[in-house]
Amino acid sequence: MGKVKKWTKMQRDQVVLLRKTGMSWPKISKQLDIPRSTCRGIWIEDSDGEVELPVPEEMVENAKVLKLVPNPRLMLIEFTDREGVARCVKRPEANHPPKSMVRVKKVDDDLYRII
């Protein structure tokens, strides 16, 4: 069995404080050099019975298929509620004809995926 590592009160307080500000577990873990699972354990023990912070829901948008491209995994979409065109990842077997409506979620700067 491994050695039990004790974390100082200051480190434990930092974990709780950073999580309350909305920082993600990987960022807290990297910043404090404490394993991610240990950070979660500290949160459970020291957060005074507070519930886990809700994960912000990603932005879902309505878009219209502009055109298909040679790559069977991609298509171009345009947004219905704002101006702009972006690439969208799709399954190769999925058939979304031009001008059909799709719901998409942002993955990267100009890359979306169908939800």
Image (cartoon, helix red, strand yellow):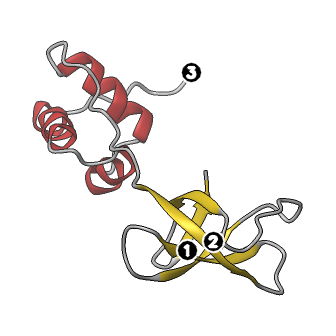
Disc 1 versus disc 3: nearer the observer: 1
Q: Label 2: few (<14), some or many (≥20) within 10 Å? A: many
Q: Label 1: few (<14), some or many (≥20) within 10 Å? A: some
Percent of width and height locating residue 52? 29, 26
Mark-to-mark CA distance, 2 and 1: 6 Å
Q: Which residue is label 3 attached to?
A: 1
- Type of amino acid under label 3: Met
At 12% from the left and 39% from the top, the residue drawn is: 17
Dot 2 falls on a residue whose secondary structure is: strand
Residue 45 quadrant: top left
Q: Label 3: few (<14), some or many (≥20) within 10 Å? A: few
Q: Which residue is label 2 attached to?
A: 88
Between residue 113 and residue 23, name the one nearer to us.
Answer: 113
At 35% from the left and 30% from the top, the residue drawn is: 40
Between residue 25 and residue 75, name the one nearer to us.
Answer: 75
Q: Which residue is label 1 attached to?
A: 111
- Type of amino acid under label 2: Cys
On screen, 84 above or below 100?
A: below
At 45% from the left and 27% from the top, the residue drawn is: 3
Residue 36 quadrant: top left
Furthest-front residue in this view: 99
